[in-house]
């Protein structure tokens, strides 16, 4: 009977709030303000920052937007541990590499010591216009860092090929089992112009592109190229694609939300799971993060739950001071730190777990620390390897847009936002954070119970997730069906915690029951002496 009780307890974890995050600002002299850039990391933890922009939110006028004067024309090397910054201009590189590597919204992924950069949007003097670049560039990160620190030529550490299949901006790139995944994005040609007019052409990619990169240092080419086309569901860009471990153990990615819908300048609220053998649409609305931002993936192998945390950015919804979900179709900058948890039954739940220090986070990047013990494949934090009640440095939020107000798009003259130069160290604590569940539009439909310890001697901790109902009753029932304790729970929806003093019970097997309207659920526990 004791073994059965333990299985029941560990099998239900819906109300668990497993960790909290803390941000600590880090100011490094000479650190540039950047947003929408690409990054790589040396073996000793230094960062290579490439491309992106030195200004804030793009302007609306077609002759001012994405001004080449604010392109990032330097490569930065950052040693966050010793607070040092080096830089070198792109000007010594071949023209096509220079032009691509000062663009914005490139897709990138580092495999071993090679950083691969795909596409990007920006001004091309060769084309005499703004274009999406059709290149794949490979960069040897460690050799480049050594050259920058020692004033040596950098050109030997860059290689590039032209390939129209790599002509993408605003998508995301991942890597799994020797295969690269280039998902979503667009091909944008010409000057940005939200006021209409023939200054640009825009074509969403609407594909998942899978391929391998053959890189022998002497040759660089793409092979085993395949595509999955879905105009309805893959028509998205500037989203967050995050590596995932799914409940069945499969590894893959989730394309969380993104912009814009086919017939409205509003974000997608649903997401897309990407697997090695295909994809599926996740028809669960997410409300608190809709645009590319810094994010972390956290896996709990004990409870088989996958958590994804989003730091600030842009969203169509936010929670007000009273916890009410507020809709704003202007899709403003927000301060929300949110967590999306995928449970073993594949269901998602969204929580607000904190706020950013300011309206920051959009187009920022999270750069993890180098810690093979803490991370799975360098990308997913292994929650169970963090000691309880311990705060652990997991990485840094770098760059992004800092806005002075939530809604600045229609009044933006370039002074209302900027590229952030502040770094935020991210610490993760394995404790019970005070998360606020976003259940207003997606109500819980079944009761979930977690209890501990089990067996229990004195006090039993009870955690509940409750569907909408006016009144619930918590009951302790013995094996004969006699009710030994009854406690009303009024107007509780979502997570609820209670400590029960059970010293009055004799040793034996009991049932904790939750009853409300048409809902009823019980769980077995053992009272020990």
Image (cartoon, rainbow, N blue to C red):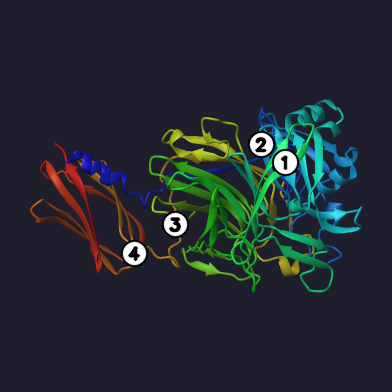
Q: Do the numbered discs 4 and 1 sit on residues whose CB atoms are within 8 Å?
A: no
Q: Which residue is mark 1?
A: 116
Looking at the picture, tell me which residue is in the foreground, 320 or 460. Answer: 460
In this rendering, which labeled residue sits more in front, label 3 or label 2?
2
Tag on residue 450?
A: none
Q: Do the numbered discs 4 and 3 sit on residues whose CB atoms are within 8 Å?
A: no
Mark with earlier residue (3, 2): 2
- Disc 2 to disc 4, how far (Cα)? 45 Å
- Disc 1 to disc 2, how far (Cα)? 8 Å
Q: Do the numbered discs 1 and 2 sit on residues whose CB atoms are within 8 Å?
A: yes
In this rendering, which labeled residue sits more in front, label 2 or label 4?
2
SS label for mark 4: loop
Mark with earlier residue (1, 3): 1
Work out which quarter of the rendered image holds the N terminus and state it: top left
Q: Is residue 61 visible?
A: no
SS label for mark 3: strand
Residue that appears at 10% across and 43% down: 506
Q: Which residue is mark 3?
A: 349
Whole-percent x, y for residue 81 in the image: 66, 30
In this rendering, which labeled residue sits more in front, label 1 or label 3?
1
Q: Do the numbered discs 1 and 3 sit on residues whose CB atoms are within 8 Å?
A: no
Dot 1: few (<14), some (14–19), or many (≥20) neighbours within 10 Å?
A: many
Tag on residue 111?
A: 2
Tag on residue 467?
A: 4
- Disc 4 to disc 3, how far (Cα)? 13 Å
- Disc 3 to disc 2, how far (Cα)? 32 Å
Whole-percent x, y for residue 389 in the image: 42, 36
Residue furthest out toward the front: 224
Dot 3: few (<14), some (14–19), or many (≥20) neighbours within 10 Å?
A: many
Side of 452 where 255 appears, left or right: right
Whole-percent x, y for residue 367 in the image: 63, 40
């Amino acid at each position: 009977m004791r073994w059965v009780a333990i299985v029941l307890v560990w099998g239900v974890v819906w109300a668990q709030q497993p960790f909290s995050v803390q941000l600590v600002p880090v100011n490094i002299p000479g650190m540039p303000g950047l947003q929408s850039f690409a990054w790589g990391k040396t073996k000793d933890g230094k960062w290579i920052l490439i491309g992106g922009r030195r200004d804030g939110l793009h302007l609306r006028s077609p002759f001012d937007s994405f001004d080449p004067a604010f392109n990032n024309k330097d490569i930065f090397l950052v040693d966050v541990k010793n607070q040092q910054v080096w830089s070198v201009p792109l000007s010594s590189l071949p023209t096509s590499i220079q032009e691509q590597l000062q663009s914005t919204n490139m897709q990138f992924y580092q495999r071993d010591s090679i950083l691969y950069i795909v596409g990007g949007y920006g001004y091309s003097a060769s084309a005499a216009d703004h274009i999406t670049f059709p290149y794949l560039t490979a960069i040897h990160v460690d050799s480049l860092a050594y050259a920058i620190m020692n004033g040596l030529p950098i050109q030997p550490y860059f290689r590039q090929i032209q390939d129209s299949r790599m002509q993408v901006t605003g998508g995301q790139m991942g890597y799994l089992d020797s295969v690269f995944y280039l998902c979503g994005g667009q091909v944008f040609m010409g000057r940005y112009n939200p006021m209409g007019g023939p200054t640009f052409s825009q074509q969403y990619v609407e594909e998942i592109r899978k391929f391998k990169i053959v890189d022998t240092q002497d040759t660089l080419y793409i092979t085993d190229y395949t595509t999955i086309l879905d105009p309805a569901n893959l028509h998205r860009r500037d989203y967050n694609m995050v590596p995932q471990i799914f409940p069945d153990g499969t590894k893959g990615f989730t394309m969380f939300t993104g912009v814009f819908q086919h017939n409205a300048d509003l974000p997608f609220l649903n997401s897309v799971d990407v697997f090695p053998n295909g994809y599926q649409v996740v028809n669960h609305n997410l409300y608190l993060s809709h645009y590319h931002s810094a994010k972390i993936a956290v896996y709990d192998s004990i409870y088989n739950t996958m958590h994804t945390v989003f730091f600030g950015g842009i969203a169509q919804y936010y929670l007000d001071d009273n916890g009410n979900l507020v809709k704003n179709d202007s899709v403003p900058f927000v301060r929300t730190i949110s967590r999306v948890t995928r449970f073993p039954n594949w269901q998602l739940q969204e929580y607000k777990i904190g706020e950013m220090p300011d309206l920051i986070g959009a187009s920022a990047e999270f750069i993890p620390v180098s810690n093979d013990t803490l991370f799975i494949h360098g990308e997913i934090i292994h929650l169970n390897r963090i000691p309880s009640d311990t705060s652990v440095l997991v990485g840094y939020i770098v760059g992004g847009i800092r806005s002075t107000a939530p809604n600045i798009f229609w009044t933006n003259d370039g002074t209302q936002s900027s590229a952030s130069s502040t770094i935020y160290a991210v610490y993760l604590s394995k404790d019970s954070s005070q998360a606020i569940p976003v259940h207003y539009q997606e109500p819980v439909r079944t009761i979930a119970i977690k209890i501990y310890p089990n067996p229990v001697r004195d006090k039993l901790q009870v955690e509940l997730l409750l569907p909408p109902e006016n009144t619930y009753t918590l009951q302790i029932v013995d094996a004969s069906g006699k009710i030994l304790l009854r406690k009303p729970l009024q107007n509780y929806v979502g997570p609820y915690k209670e400590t029960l003093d059970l010293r009055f019970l004799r040793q034996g097997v009991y049932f904790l029951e939750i009853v409300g309207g048409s809902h009823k659920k019980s769980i077995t526990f053992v009272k020990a002496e």
